[in-house]
Image: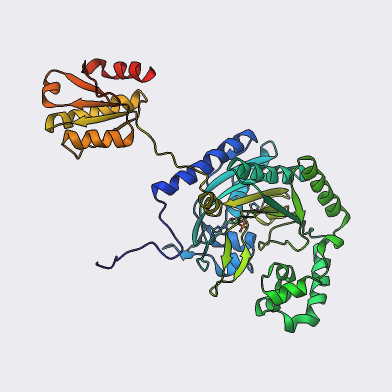
Amino acid sequence: MAKIKYQTPSGMHDILSEDYAYYEKVYEIVNDIARFYGFGRIQTPVLEDAALFEKSTGATTDIVEKQMFTLKTKGGDELALRPEFTPGIARAYVQHGMLNMPQPVKLYTYGPLFRYEHPQAGRFRQFHQVDFEVFGEESPAIDAEIIQIFYAILKELKFSHLIIEVNSIGDSQCRPYYKKLLANYLRPRANSLCADCRRRMRQNPLRMLDCKEEKCQRIKAQAPQIIDHLCDSCKAHFKSLLEFLDEADLPYHLDPYLVRGLDYYTKTVFEIFSDRTVQVVDEQGEIVQRSALVGGGRYDNLLKILGGKEIAASGAAAGVERIMAIMKDRGTLAMEEAKPRVFLAQLGDLPKKKSLKILEEFRRAKISVAESLGRDSLRTQLGRADKLGAEYTIILGQKEVLENAVVVRKMETGEQETVKMENLVDELKKRLKR
Ligand code: HAM
């Protein structure tokens, strides 16, 4: 066989129609829940100024440092394919003066994102997220609402055994002190850390807590915990968040080392896992990471950095492919093939020409019809109608066209009746009702 010349780029996939049904199922539930909780849909461009992500996601984060697809336009602008939604939505909030609207402003979106990762299970270079953001609300009630929303989405998708990991990473009051404390703890142990963590120790020691290397995990286990060093206002915020989660019966678990790999977070951070979560496996086949379905948190400083005022904000995103992988694995979505109620069989040139108009009349009447316009044999077409489970087949031959009529065949019994063309849709409506 000849070698296929062009294929999808590494880590990027075509979504074929059988898979698209999963995406649609997820988006249907997301739209319903978003509407219920008062979120408006936003769509931002796939390309943004690369500097937007450097400033928000953080210049030294893996996402910006290693994973961004960037390009230079003919005009010399440096753009990036969005690796996440949050910076673009925050930019839109500032750019469109949403600050002057009644607060909080609640926005959601879904669509493709791009990260230059090492492709593996649950980790792609083009993937999809569902993302919810709330601007202009400081209360931990909103953090809890976002957690509840993602929990509800997963529950509606029939996920059980969900684990919500939460932590607080403080704010610009208390975090610098904790960072120093952590750096002091790590410095004498630097030789036992991986190369990445030795670098992180200088740039952002917090990220060391995120490291999946076993030797770093051992050191992490004895490290001071940020939760013990929060300032009073962060402590009170976190305590209140946990009370909201308790009251809402959301089964959370405290993870004092959860920091998340993005720079903009303040106070609340959280992730949601399923006990069936896809694992990320390294080249040797070792499981290196349980991959989260959902990640998010509060980011009260970002809007100011982007040129807005000091606006509190909070949000989260779920990876659609990771959700789908579990749905597929479980076989939860028994894929219902759209079953047509009527089949249109045509015999010869003239009937074929009439077919498109008839199909359109059925579409307007909202009656599902299948056809096989490329086939001419009646036997083949009736066989297909049977296979698809159509209740009636309309047979249109030369004679019928000349008489301005059609034959309606009841598939179950084989009974046939001739019906005037102008009465066809009404006749079928009646029969399908019975
Ligand atoms: P994130 O943790 O980078 O957060 O991504 C959120 C989710 O997207 C992950 O939990 C995972 O399910 C999915 N995901 C991330 N990278 C990939 C990939 N390469 N392949 C497949 N799925 C992936 C954010 O993006 C933040 N913007 C979330 C947020 C919104 N925080 C506040 N608001």
Left or right of 348 on screen, residue 299: right
> Can you name the residue that lies furthest to the front here?
413
Q: Quadrant of the N terminus?
A: bottom left
- Residue 422: percent from left, percent from top: 23, 16
Total marks shown come to 0
Closer to the camera, 377 or 10? 377
Q: Residue furthest right?
A: 232
Question: Which residue is painted at 81% across and 63% down in the image?
Answer: 226
Residue 9 position in % (x across, y down): 41, 64
* The quadrant where residue 100 appears: top right
Q: Residue at x 83, y 71 (%)?
A: 181
Q: Measured along the vertical axis of the image, is residue 403 above or below residue 122?
A: above
Q: What residue is rendered at 69% in x and 52% in y?
A: 163
Could you say where residue 223 lies in the image, as x and y percent from the top left? 81, 71
Q: Is residue 97 shown to the viewer in this render?
A: no
Asked whether the viewer can see residue 130, the reply is: yes
Figure check: 412 above or below 92: above
Q: Is residue 99 above or below residue 292?
A: above
Q: Quadrant of residue 351?
A: top left
Please provide percent x and percent y for residue 178: 82, 67
Against 149, residue 64 (above or below) is below
Residue 154 placement, left or right of 399: right
Ligand 1 image position (quadrant): bottom right
Given residues 138 and 217, the one toward you in this image is: 217
Q: Quadrant of the C terminus?
A: top left
Which colour assignment does the render follow? rainbow
| Of 45 and 288, the residue lying toward us | 288
Residue at image coords 44%, 46%: 20
